Image (spheres, coloured by chain):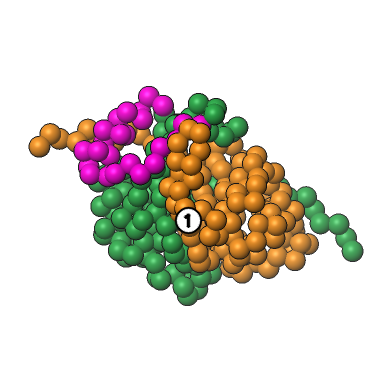
Chain colours: A green, B orange
Amino acid sequence: MPEAPPPPPLGGVLETCLYVAEMARARAFYEDVLGLAPMFSDERLTAYPVGGRSALLLFLRGSTTATVHLPGGTIPPHDGAGPAHCALAVAAADLPGWEARLAAMGVAVEGRTRWARGSTSLYFRDPDGHLLELATPGLWPIY
Amino acid sequence: MPEAPPPPPLGGVLETCLYVAEMARARAFYEDVLGLAPMFSDERLTAYPVGGRSALLLFLRGSTTATVHLPGGTIPPHDGAGPAHCALAVAAADLPGWEARLAAMGVAVEGRTRWARGSTSLYFRDPDGHLLELATPGLWPIY
């Protein structure tokens, strides 16, 4: 049997997806509270650029369970549920501003951790219960 | 009522999480097929750096449903289910190498799309049914 060719490099996670029950409610949170601005939005999907080359995608739960046929090809089914987690990078100097922002918008900080390498993480929920984290540098060897 | 301070900038999505049923099976896929190397791993979590500053986190499904108490603070509960989606960035020149790699490792390409801006996306599944995408530049305004 021929040996498999080696895996080429991966350039990063491009799209991170969360599945939401109500698009309007989710958009109000991600746009009015977190300050994100969509680069695409329809009933099924809202896509936000986040700090450069990463994209946060909100899909309406249950709306992507059939193959999508496009002029250029197909997107297979996907969906998700549960209070999934994702973390967003923030500068250490901006953490107090974020704490003030969340407090003023009525978003409760549900947890907080100081990591051994010097990072601080704040945890809070979006309207679907997803556990969001704002993390300052010093959490991972790569950050 | 005082006006809320503006949201400070976000530096990108730092952590993207998938929830897996069997950690050993998932690790075999992400490491042996996709070529990722963990920066942390225990029974509950395997964390992979992906192309610089993004991290892909595999959590054992159901293992993070209680608050985690650490010396530096707490991590609130989170969990996820379903064939969620995430996309990884690859250079256009590396796409043929990835197709050869996936074919040689017995991973079926389930969908393929050519986007208007010039990107190509390949879709396939991890052992938990998550819909993974390898996307070349030209998909989003930011990529």
Taking B13 as reference, is B135 left or right? right
Task: Give the camera-side residue of B100 and B42.
Answer: B42
Q: Residue at x 41, y 61 (%)?
A: A19
Note whether residue A39 is visible: no
Q: Residue at x 37, y 24 (%)?
A: A93
Q: Residue at x 41, y 71 (%)?
A: A62
Task: Give the camera-side residue of B68 and A20.
Answer: B68
Q: Secondary structure at mark 1?
A: loop
- Disc 1 marks a residue whose amino acid type is Thr
Q: Residues within 10 Å of mark 1 (few under 14, many from 20)?
A: few
Q: Residue at x 80, y 53 (%)?
A: A5
Name above or below for residue A33 compared with residue B21.
above
> Which x, y percent locates residue A10?
64, 46
* Residue range highlighted in magenta: A92-115
Q: Which residue is mark 1?
A: B65
Taking B56 as reference, is A79 left or right? left
